Amino acid sequence: MTDRILRATELTAAGFEPFGDVIETEGRQWRWINQATAQRYDDLARVDVSQAHGRPLISIFRASPQKLPFHVRSLERHPLSSQCFYPLDGRSFLVIVAEDGQGPIAGRIRAFLSSGHQGVNYRRNTWHHSLIALGQISNFLVVDRGGTEENCEELSVDGEVVWVAGPQ
């Protein structure tokens, strides 16, 4: 089978809207707090973790960089919650998601490249790849669901999808 070459597009709120929220301060409303020593940006993502008595779980993931070309072999989704990743080191990372639909999932996969000052919040049931750091070990603040119920489904990608650096 011929590889499907996947190129990442810029991560924008409009482009990512079918999959969730882009978490960024650029262009967002803010207000002064703490005697005007800090700017506060509210409601940057819709955290959805309460299904089946879930609770917010805040973690830090330390991700090793992936080698190029990167082969997309599996995707995952979380039926009980959203899942949020925000880079703590200001490093770009790769976001791979798949649109809902019929037929092979390989043809519905899309890639976005975070600027390093943007995070993502995947909506519940959004197929996505696990965290993909680029270049160096990177730390991420993660907000997802804590609870006893299983909240991760995995799917093997039908076909060969390869991400290479460069614009689409």
Image (cartoon, rainbow, N blue to C red):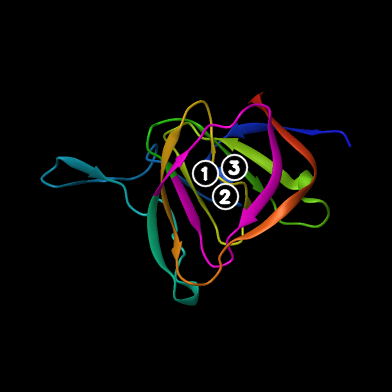
Residue in the image at 45% along x and 32% along y? 116
Which region of the structure is painted magenta? Answer: 60-85
Label 3 near label 1: C-beta < 8 Å? Answer: yes
SS class, disc 3: helix
Question: Quadrant location of residue 37?
Answer: top left
Distance (Cα) linking label 1 and label 3: 6 Å
Q: Which one is in front, 55 or 61?
A: 61
Distance (Cα) linking label 2 and label 1: 6 Å
Q: Is residue 64 above or below residue 74?
A: above
Question: Quadrant location of residue 165?
Answer: top right
SS class, disc 1: helix
Residue in the image at 87% along x and 33% along y? 2
Q: Is residue 80 left or right of residue 117?
A: right
Q: Which one is in front, 99 or 1?
A: 1
Label 2 near label 3: C-beta < 8 Å? Answer: yes
Question: Residue 49 location, x and y as percent?
Answer: 45, 66
Disc ID at residue 17: 2
Q: Which one is in front, 59 or 96?
A: 59
Which residue bears the numbered disc 3?
Answer: 15
Label 1 near label 2: C-beta < 8 Å? Answer: yes
SS class, disc 2: loop
Disc ID at residue 13: 1
Q: Quadrant of the C terminus?
A: top right
Residue in the image at 74% along x and 51% along y? 156
